[in-house]
Image (cartoon, rainbow, N blue to C red):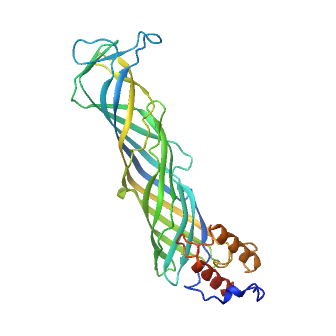
Amino acid sequence: MNRFLPPAACAACLVSAIGASQGAPVVFAIDPDASAVSGSFGLLAETAGTLIGDYDETTNPGGTQTRPGLFGGSGNNPIPVTIDIGSSTGLATAPAGSFTLDADTDALTVSIDAFTADLLNGAAVESSLDLTFLFETFRTINPGGFYPGGIPLPISLPAGELSSLALTQNAPAAPGALVPNPDGTFTLAAAVPVTLTLSGTALGGAAIDPGPVGLLLPLAGTYAPAPDRSASVTLSIDLDAFSQSVDASGLPALPEIPFELPTLGGETASVLLNLAVGAITLEGVGSVTLVANGTPGGCNAADIAEPFGVLDLSDLLAFIEAFGAQVEPADYDDNGVFDLNDIQLFITAFLGGCP
């Protein structure tokens, strides 16, 4: 049923609308019990800085001292080092999240908005950590150790932890495509601009956070509408295709990291690492499967306020408020601009009435 406004209030309805009427976007919730992340996620970081013993004349007079070269010298001296850090995290998690999806099964297009996926969903997962040192020749005092320069020194460290890994849509996505299947479902293909964020700890609790990374996320899957306008969506993300370099120029130096350096005698030399990150590469292997279920709100794109299932003054007022504030759901053509075209599309949907 469509409840029309009085003529004075409906003067704007005389404006000719552009484009076809749309179905109301449906909010989908990702089902963790049916979804899965399987594979591994890797972080490779190149760093440069210094290594120095933890000796302090006042607070730690028996600590380790570091000195350059084979012989001579005195005191505790910083040793220039470069360190490649490799971290690999095995993933077997049940992701959560949500998104809105607007499917036009006549035009065979689909729009995805407000996409979020928490790939760990609160689970902290263990990460392996390997370092490869490259340095000039130096030695340690207390305990005594010798380290010939120019030879990479690989060291495996106790496991770190990846505590968060998430994808969040950061801009409107271009319309994707639907291809009808004989069983009434549709094959879906779309690309969504997202921000990848991750955080964790390593090296005895040092925080790992390379900052936000922008990606264009390819999504493929199946859209299955139901007669009551609910629907299910299965999306897949191929991690094997994922490799992204991160601009680390704006990252601060890492906090000073205490580290036990093995010596040939079996003892360990206590040193402090001071490092700045030069480059970061993120890589993935495996796949993400997201199964989501959607329940419609309104009967069409203009039914944006309660009571749903009827087009009335509350929908008009909600649109005016959203349009004035330049927020969703008033951006009907999903281009990030609030203009006459959005008004025309809303009027077309409003006048189209509820089924």
Give the percent coordinates (x, y) of residue 121. 55, 50
Q: Nearer the viewer, residue 186 or 27?
A: 27
Where residue 337 appears, as percent x and y from the top left, is 55, 71
> Residue 167 or 214: which is nearer the viewer?
214
Left or right position of 13 against 183: right
Residue at x 40% of width, y 38% of height: 128
Q: Is residue 205 visible?
A: yes
Residue 207 pos. (x, y %):
48, 37
Instruction: Place residue 27 in its image quadrant.
Output: bottom right
Residue at figure coordinates x 26%, y 12% from the top left? 73
Residue 117 to residue 10: above or below? above
Q: Residue 242: horizontal and vertical position, in percent?
A: 37, 56
| Residue 89 as seen in the image, left or right of residue 164 | left
Q: Quadrant of the C terminus?
A: bottom right
Q: Check the image and name the residue furthest to the right.
A: 6
Q: Is residue 355 visible?
A: no
As displayed, is residue 133 above or below residue 182? above
At x 38% / y 32%, what residue is drawn? Answer: 275
Vertical placement of residue 107 versus 252, above or below? below
Quadrant in which the N terminus appears: bottom right
Q: Residue at x 38, y 27 (%)?
A: 273
- The image quarter containing residue 241 is bottom left
